[in-house]
Amino acid sequence: MNRMTLITCTLAMLAVGCTDPKAANESNFENAIQSHLDATYPRCFITQNFPAVIEFDFGGQRQTLAALAKAGLVSTQEKKIEAVSFGAIKRYKTVTEYDLTDEGRQHYKADATKNLRGDSLGGFCFGKASITEIEEFTEPADMMGARISRVRYRYEISGFPSWATSEDMLNAVPALKKAHGASKQPDVANAVLILTSNGWQHESNVRR
């Protein structure tokens, strides 16, 4: 084999390695992680069905709704409802009912997700996540019948509506505050990638 033929064969092998979706390289890992991020975003940072009356404040719902009201996405109305009654004596209490404004409906997605009982929930969903760098990955290894690689990467998030970046909103929704931080400086995350017949995929996208 002459020198030119050897060079040609080497280049051909490199080209195949670069385009092989099953190869363990940064390009394939980036594609697998980006596909996962594309399926995760837009993300529903706030989920709530409307109209809503919050009698028990689980997870800071009132603070979140107050921030949405301040942003003009939710309206508030004081209403009297019947409380626990004893005999013929009826008792009433005043509660705040929250509902979407016209502006809020433009940003709201009905049936955005489901709760643990399988009930549909609407929500405010936005953002786009983009991988910026593969920092490192382990050599592929067999584990529990699958070939995997652990990947450490950086990503950034964009596409925040202006109302979602107010101080009130960021303080009310910790997950939103963390995500907003990734819009200013790429955040670090870890992923487990699994080799399938179609190439590398994020573990959350692989059916077991």
Image (spheres, rainbow, N blue to C red):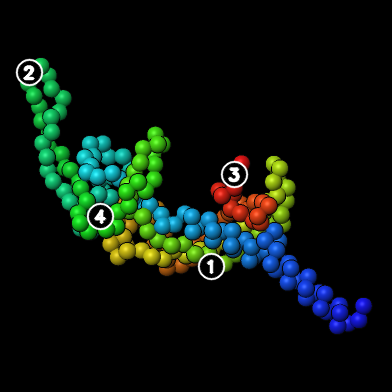
* Amino acid type of the residue tagged 2 in the rendering: Ala
- For residue 105, above or below residue 86: below
Choose the circle earlier in sequence order: 4 or 3.
4
Image-based side of 179 in relation to 37, left or right: left
Q: Which residue is painted at 83% across and 79% down in the image?
A: 7
Q: CA distance from mark 1 to mark 3?
A: 27 Å
* Amino acid type of the residue tagged 4 in the rendering: Arg
Name the mark on residue 105: 4
Choose the circle earlier in sequence order: 4 or 2.
2
Image-based side of 4 in relation to 157, left or right: right
Query: Which element type, helix, strand or loop, lies under badge 4?
Result: helix
Q: CA distance from mark 4 to mark 3?
A: 35 Å
Query: Which element type, helix, strand or loop, lies under badge 3?
Result: loop
Say which of 44 and 86 sits in front: 44
Residue at which label 1 appears: 132
Say which quarter of the image contains residue 125.
bottom left
* Amino acid type of the residue tagged 1 in the rendering: Thr
Q: Quadrant of the N terminus?
A: bottom right
Q: Are marks 1 and 2 in contact (CB under 8 Å)?
A: no
Residue at which label 2 appears: 88
Image x and y of residue 208, in percent: 61, 41
Q: CA distance from mark 1 to mark 2?
A: 67 Å
Q: CA distance from mark 4 to mark 2?
A: 42 Å
**In front: mark 1 or mark 3?**
3
